[in-house]
Amino acid sequence: MIAEIITIGDEILIGQVIDSNSAFIAESLNSIGISVGQITSIGDTADQIKQTLDEASLRAELILITGGLGPTRDDITKKTLAEYFGSKLIVNEEALSMIEKLLTPRGVQMNELNRSQAVLPDNCELIPNRFGTAMGMWFTRKGRHFISMPGVPYEMKGMMTGFILIQLRERFRLPAVEHRTILTQGVPESHLAMRLEQFEDQLPGNIKLAYLPSPGMVRLRLTAKGAEKQAVRDLLEKEAEKLVKIIPEAVYGQEDQKLEAIIGELLLQKNATLVTAESCTGGTIAQMIVSVPGASRYFAGSVVAYSNDLKTRILGIDKALIDKYGAVSRQVAGAMAENVRLLCRSDYAIATSGIAGPDGGTPDKPVGTTWIAVASPHKMICEPFQFSDVRDRNIQRTSVTALNMLRKLLLAEN
Amino acid sequence: MIAEIITIGDEILIGQVIDSNSAFIAESLNSIGISVGQITSIGDTADQIKQTLDEASLRAELILITGGLGPTRDDITKKTLAEYFGSKLIVNEEALSMIEKLLTPRGVQMNELNRSQAVLPDNCELIPNRFGTAMGMWFTRKGRHFISMPGVPYEMKGMMTGFILIQLRERFRLPAVEHRTILTQGVPESHLAMRLEQFEDQLPGNIKLAYLPSPGMVRLRLTAKGAEKQAVRDLLEKEAEKLVKIIPEAVYGQEDQKLEAIIGELLLQKNATLVTAESCTGGTIAQMIVSVPGASRYFAGSVVAYSNDLKTRILGIDKALIDKYGAVSRQVAGAMAENVRLLCRSDYAIATSGIAGPDGGTPDKPVGTTWIAVASPHKMICEPFQFSDVRDRNIQRTSVTALNMLRKLLLAEN
């Protein structure tokens, strides 16, 4: 079954609002085996809505529409759908009682605008809204299904999960679609692609591989379709295993795992603690670690020693060492990691020192030159990297590279 | 002039990625007086791409396309566009040298895939990519303009701001559209809306006010259209002044100023330095400050004292003080600010201590309870806040609130 999504609202076309509803709807549909062929965002204009419905129903059996169901004048979706489907607009008693039940506990007196929300086309099925007064509508015509939902994200999500997805599974025989995502760090997209070329060639026709890059990382997503869920899953499992075996050193996790959460788990397993000493990353690694709820169980803190003075004053790095090798050096990064570990009586430590740019580069150490050190009670690893000339990407790449170096050290010491 | 945006990528149709590119492009186009009529997201399929181009060019003069320009096999946009425009694919020497210049400093060996990125249609204009190997393409046919950009957001943004918007303004006569953005912190959107109700009512018909909220902040954007640039500007200037006078205490800046950059300027003017001592924000404030190029001139660093042990061990907070008042208290936040300031021999300091959640709340101090302190050589301000129950929003709101408190302190001491 092919679906299309239509989002209605001038605020999308002027770029005021990022359309996150479509991603949610698309993901939900895919998860029950319905493919989305197209997503179209249009303005609050009757002609454009009708035209877009015409075009979508030539390509798709199922059309999901969001937006334009509010009670104010610029919301014209309901009126337009009624015209499109030749409906009479009448008070729907079920909707009226739902709206009453919603407003009464909030102490809201029902006004004309609220009451107008219970006026619905006479030839649609009502989709209840648990969180608002704009009801959903399900129209059926010539084997095509048109579902209209409000644009408020949590109202739309309530309808999708509480009614629409359940009904779609009951009413249609849907194929199985499964995804597997493999998370990699440290190998550029183009290099991964070359190493995976043969793998891609041998993939069965119903499996697709996609590359999804972000600074320092590439997510590899395998998608498989088929008639039978378990068979699709088994096939996907087998191919995912093959893939991981080709690039084992690049893989750090699967699905929606976060590197900082994986490290947290490993530290908890060891009952160990972590600190960071950050120069060029300026607290970004600490901030990523702290973004994980419960990080206080293993993360003690960080010394962001941005100035050389702080490297000396708090971390106790010998000033002579900085003068001799420079702050961006194996010696200083290593000393930062070891000193912060001892100072904070922590088991593990990460340290970074680099030239994030745009200024500060030299012929010897151009912008992007970075040293990362990870230390444990037993070991210290200190590596140089040459990143790009874009400041925020350098900070991001340094941070994920450092976290992955720590992950490898934690695993090696298991 | 009417434009349409086409985003290409299976990852959008399966909902794995939220299409934020379209909002950026739409906002950019609107800012130079080009309206967006439709946004269409489709998969990596040649037929669908061609069909969508056909349809879009019936409705719009300008068609902007993102995605599908990577070097891997699932990226078919370039090949499809070459078919669509009857192009020959040839090595573009200019593109080749750009790609070389990009990769050489990174120490990346140019491989076949990189080289294939320099193969471009012979009948398009090259759009340089400063940040990646996928070049942009500008095709012209029958008075329609087709612009293809990579889907990686920062590469696309670089092309839009560095080339495309400039060229569109040069090549076409566009109506005058002017924007003024007023940046506020600390007052919720609904409260602003109430205070600005009368102001909105009196606005001339060609001026619109939009509320753009993010955690702890609301951007207020005034947009005016008209035939004559200077008249539009003058009108906008007058209304912006009125607006600021209604909510003066909430305004911290204008246009695309960043709070962390404003603070940097103020510190440079005073020739003063700043450090932070962060508990609940876990390095986020340091990371924001360091995101500004040149921050090393005034930012010395941070002690991220996430554990109480580090508060004592590095910052020298008396353990008895923590036991008596709790880490989330006026006393401890104040001591953190003052101690980090003295320890690092800095002029100014920020300290945060709060319960970001989801765990750690008590009936006395629920999740969201936060103390923020800012200190100078002459003054210390320490304030309590009750934020929400969402961890990442709490961290964000604490950080921007702290930065704004410091901004006010810096101004008060002028």
Image (tube, coloured by chain):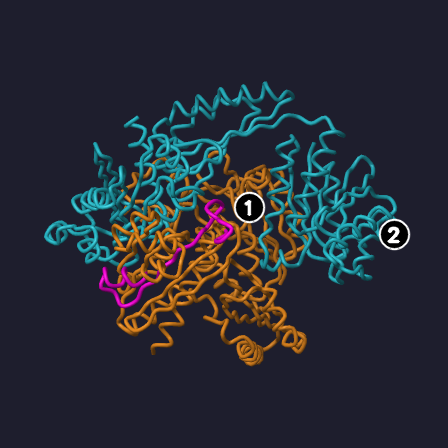
Chain colours: A cyan, B orange
| Few, some or many residues within 10 Å of mark 2 (<14, 14–19, 20+) | some
Indicate the position of residue A165 as horizontal and vertical percent values. 69, 35
The stretch in magenta equals: B337-366
Q: Is residue A280 magenta?
A: no
Q: Secondary structure at mark 2?
A: strand
Indicate the position of residue A159 as horizontal and vertical percent values. 70, 42
Q: Are marks 1 and 2 in contact (CB under 8 Å)?
A: no
Q: In this rendering, does residue A330 appear at all? A: yes
> Residue visible at 74% across and 36% down?
A61
Q: Secondary structure at mark 1?
A: loop
Which image quarter: residue A193?
Answer: top left
Could you tell me which chain the residue with mark 2 belongs to?
A
Q: In this rendering, does residue B229 appear at all? A: no
Dot 2 amino acid type = Val
> Residue visible at 22% across and 56% down?
A310
Residue nearest the observer in this picture, A402 or B54: A402
Residue where numbered disc 2 is placed: A91
Query: From the image, which quarter does the N terminus of chain A lie in?
Result: top right
Indicate the position of residue A177 as horizontal and vertical percent values. 60, 28
Question: Closer to the camera: disc 1 or disc 2?
Answer: 2
> Residue visible at 69% across and 56% down?
A43
Residue where numbered disc 1 is placed: B18
Dot 1 amino acid type = Ile
Which image quarter: residue B295?
Answer: bottom left
Residue nearest the observer in this picture, B127 or B330: B330
> Residue visible at 66% across and 59% down?
A10
Q: CA distance from mark 1 to mark 2?
A: 37 Å
Which image quarter: residue B112?
Answer: top left
Does residue B300 sit above or below A262 in this rendering?
Answer: below
Indicate the position of residue A284 as horizontal and vertical percent values. 35, 50
